[in-house]
Amino acid sequence: MPLAPATRLGPYEIVSPLGAGGMGEVYRARDPRLKRGRSPRGDAPVKCSGGRADNLRVPDPLDPPEGTSAMTAIDKALNSLLDLGDPAVRRDRAELVDQALRTLLAMTEGDATVIMLPGRADRLVLHSGTAAPSIAPVSAEGSEAARALALDPHPIAIAELADNPRLSTHDGCPGVEAGPAMFAALRRRGSEPGYLAVYRRRGRAKFGAADVRGVALLATVLQHSLEALRLARGLEKLAFTDDLTEVYNARFVKSALKREARRAARFAQELSLLLVEADRMLEGSEGDPGDDLIKELAAQLVQQVRSFDFVARFDAGRFIVVLPQTGRTGAIEVAERIRMAVEARPFRGAKMTVSIGISVLPQDGAEPELLVTIAGRSLAAAQSEGGNRVESRLDRAA
């Protein structure tokens, strides 16, 4: 749709009286050095564009002179912003979101902040002075702000949220009387956008151009940090997951077993290890012999252990099961449960059985390599007795 004829206003011209989604006005600077920005009239709601940081300085009647306290507050929040985007600091998603909400409160002196992540049906709300965010559902009709940001990703600044009933109803902040508000898009490929929002109580000063720039920058840093975290998790899964069985691989179990052994020693806890191998391998119709049997066995092992235990494929036909906070008696119970579950489930009409060897920290040793060796000897003893057995031996003789 062609833009409406431009209306001149000082150094600006209004190119779209309705703006994206009919929510406000889009302003284009006649002087190209100003780019797009806030209306010099202070009208709201407005759409403010991004662009290069050195092109974002737009005159605003609410901007304080350089060196005033408002600029100092932004400078203080810069440390948090830089820390949020530091790739050397490892955080999970909850920590990233929490820091982003607190940084936005500090940058804008808001009364509350809200984040709606892309593709989610809830919002996290953090009020000034509270210890932790709370959860608020998204309106049944969806988010009006998210729909507008899907059409135009530039931040939305609202002078009085109460004057826009649809936004106030669908995207207002619980516990804050509708006043000034800002929304910045959080985008992810393949999902509807979410947003990062900040609110002030009715009667407080509306957000200025510096606030708009700040929330746009913060949303961009958070968006890229969340995407980097998602990609890192995917790469980690590829690095530590066995392609055939989709359980952990030997690379993972070597590092994880060392970590669990140190933890058990520190807290004077027991740790048990099971070494599991099928007694007979079946010929698969495709691929390597026994591939289907190995996949079936991996699935059985995962079903029989706790959520904080872990299963890994140790080599071609063997699996390791690590049982934190478990002594010999508990390990034997788990091993017998696995053995009986495998035996009770026919595979392609044939009976499948397993032999299992056990070792326990600290009785059988404190080093992960020694625990694996002892479990291997126990496994060999079970197989020498005809298989379909569980063995746990204390002797360390070769």
Image (tube, rainbow, N blue to C red):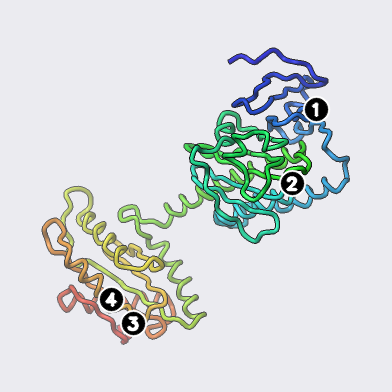
The residue where tag 2 is placed is 108
Q: Disc 1 or 2, which lies upstream in sequence?
A: 1
**Label 1: which secondary element:** loop
The residue where tag 1 is placed is 40
Report how far apart the C-alphas of labels 4 and 2 lie in the structure. Answer: 61 Å
How many residues crowd mark 3 within 10 Å: few (<14), some (14–19), many (20+)? some
Q: Disc 1 or 3, which lies upstream in sequence?
A: 1
Residue at 41% from the left image edge and 62% from the top image edge: 251
Quarter containing the N terminus: top right
Report how far apart the C-alphas of labels 1 and 3 lie in the structure. Answer: 75 Å
Tell me the kind of residue under disc 4: Gly
The residue where tag 4 is placed is 357
Tell me the kind of residue under disc 3: Arg
Q: Disc 4 or 2, which lies upstream in sequence?
A: 2
Tell me the kind of residue under disc 2: Thr
Query: Which is more foreground, mark 2 or mark 3?
Result: 2
Report how far apart the C-alphas of labels 2 and 3 lie in the structure. Answer: 58 Å
CB atoms of marks 3 and 4 within 8 Å:
no
**Residue 159 in view in this figure:** yes
Residue 63 at x, y = what percent? 83, 38
Q: What is the number of the mark on residue 328? A: 3
CB atoms of marks 2 and 3 within 8 Å:
no
Residue at 18% from the left image edge and 73% from the top image edge: 388
Residue at 25% from the left image edge and 59% from the top image edge: 294
